[in-house]
Amino acid sequence: TLLNISSFTGSVTFNILPGTYTTPADWQVIVGAVSGASATNRITFQAQAPGTVTINVAGTNTANYVIKLDGASYVDLKNLVLVNSGTSYGRVVELAGSASYDSVVRCRLTGVSTTSNSNDRAVIYANNTGSMISNVIKADTIQNGSHGIYWWSPSTNSVTHTFSNNVISGSREAYLYARTLSNATITGNICSASGVGTHYGFYVPYSQNGYTMTGNTITTSGSGDVYGVYNTYCNNTSA
């Protein structure tokens, strides 16, 4: 479903009534760019009461998401339970294009339990083909998937994102894979996985202009090489 909001003035909040929603034609949603959205005029999708709304759909090769922010900016997802019950295609939240200033806060996101490293099964997936700026992934519970968060950028135009205070568990290859980030903040996350093969923890290649990494807890056990933080080709200051 493509949510068609052409323009608006003032902040808009969609309160979703309690229930479990499972019809892909109605609840597999794309939010595109909206004229009038700004730092003071945000769009919020939230459960009417925290923990009372579950959206459970199966991803496919043509619609691999529960909610996709496609070039959307100033959008907040709050207090939702989102589940991708697919097998080969298991993304839950996708950000695409130049999606910026968006947030996913206090949501429970559940992907597929998998032994695959394919990003088709990442719980949160971002493909920064545009210039993503200042997105926030905060205080979420992120379960399963090949990666808890897979954030890909071809160059240093993906800047000042925040990944904080999340609980990430069961990720097959990495809790966070973030390529070519600039000035990111990765702090206060609690991460755990067991029975994995080679695991990279926080895998941050080609990062530029520094990032901040503090106060994270990583507990991983498996049969292969296990890393807490894995940096390659970076120009950073980390702590």
Image: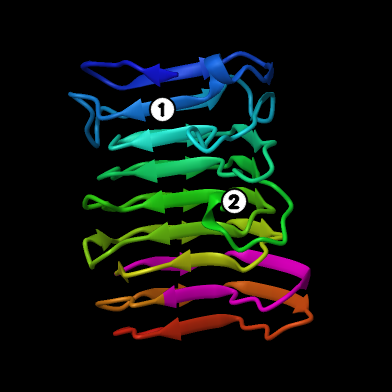
Residue 200 magenta: yes
Please name the residue that numbered disc 1 is placed on.
30
The x and y percentages for residue 205 are 40, 77
Depth check, front residue: 93 or 12: 93
Task: Please say which color scheme the image uses.
Answer: rainbow
The magenta-colored residue range is 183-204
Which numbered disc flags the more N-terminal residue, 2 or 1? 1
The x and y percentages for residue 127 are 36, 52
Q: Which mark is residue 121?
A: 2
Depth check, front residue: 115 or 228: 115
- Kind of residue at badge 2: Arg
Residue 198 magenta: yes
CA gap between label 2 and label 1 equals: 18 Å
Q: Is residue 156 left or right of residue 239?
A: left
Closest to the camera, between mark 2 and mark 1, is 2
For the C terminus, which image quadrant? bottom left
Snapshot quadrant of residue 12: top left
